Amino acid sequence: MALAALRSAIALAAVSALTLSHAAAADPVADFYRGKQIRMIIAFGPGGGYDLYARLLAKHMSRFIPGNPTFIAQNMPGAGSMIGAQYMMHQAPHDGTAVAMLSKDSPMNIVVNNSPDKAAFAKLNWIGNVSEDNYIMTVWAKTGVKSVEDATRTELSMGATAANGAAALYPHILNNIFGTKFRVIAGFSGSTQLYLAMERGEIDGRGSDSWVTLRSTKPEWLRDKKINVLMQMGFRRDKNTADIPLMIDLARSPVERMLFEMLSASARVGASLLTTADVPVERLGALRAAFNAVMKDPQFLADAEHAKLEVNPLPGEEVQEAVSRTVNASKEILDLLTAATAKGKAFNCAEAAKDQALCDR
């Protein structure tokens, strides 16, 4: 009897140990994502650089997320990607089943337009940037304009998706500071429509474009020298446009450099993936780890090369820091930025800056 009881106790202990082992091995992230879908919001129309990057991520990320959820891509264009941003801030579930790719200038748009959503935007969680990509300002070569200085003598119509987006912001600030003669025409739905308008002669150029998008969708323009690049917005010259001046290179005073540096911060955001606020920390960590793994994955890199998409990644933590610096910029720099970007009003540094020494050239 005692032997039977001993055997029963040993068996029970073994079962308990096995149960505890399985419990310890359980992965709450995998358990959550198994059998689920992740909705990939692409805040632009189909065919542009953001769309290509987002769909490529949707194709590959599932393999690296515990539980292997499927990705469903959905284009949600409008207002320079702010329609998608509104969805992520106010409608998407806060559980890690919704991710998005917004315009890299979305943090700047929130700040420049003093959006009431500034606090909500600051809470979004950034997963990673596929490519730290400079903006470029382009015009049709037939205009004969080859530099910002040339644009002070020739009126040019510049296309944009939104009147308050980067493609409108850069021409306005150059008009105010340097006296260029850009005329912004807003309302285009995305890169495809903007490129078509340039080909038709409906506009002369774009206030901001992505080298990656241009290279992947219009390589013949580069091959045949159909466009001129006037400047690029970032902190380092892109290897493909090393002879084109950075916006910060054009600064003639400390104030102008401060403004141009803030306007160049979008390069750090690039083609970034983000998710909503309040996502459980272990799921956010899993999404960031999956993104980092994809950036090194041979299959992903081969597909990116085939699509002529640059891969120059930045981890989510670094993107988060860059976004935070922009959204939480000081009142002094925001007041200067407001003065410099006011439509149709020349920038007067002496009136806008508290420290007049910053205006000295």
Image (cartoon, rainbow, N blue to C red):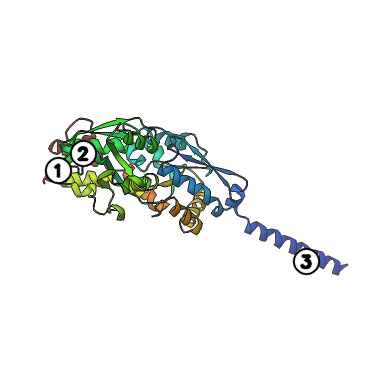
Residue at mark 1 to residue at mark 2: CA–CA distance? 22 Å
Q: Secondary structure at mark 1?
A: loop
Q: Position of residue 79 (x, y in %)?
A: 38, 32
Viewer-closest of 127 and 43: 43
- Disc on the earlier residue, 1 or 2: 2
Residue appearing at x 46%, y 45% in the figure: 54
Name the image quarter holding the N terminus. bottom right
Q: Which residue is mark 3?
A: 10
Q: Which residue is mark 1?
A: 355
Q: Secondary structure at mark 2?
A: helix
- Disc on the earlier residue, 1 or 3: 3
Q: Which residue is mark 2?
A: 174
Above-or-below relation of 22 to 94: below
Residue appearing at x 31%, y 34% in the figure: 159
Instruction: State which mark lies toward you, 1 or 2.
Output: 2
Quadrant in the rendering for residue 356: top left
Viewer-closest of 304 and 87: 304
Residue at mark 1 to residue at mark 3: CA–CA distance? 81 Å
Amino acid at pointer 2 = Leu
Amino acid at pointer 3 = Ile
Amino acid at pointer 1 = Asp
Instruction: State which mark lies toward you, 1 or 3.
Output: 1
Q: Secondary structure at mark 3?
A: helix
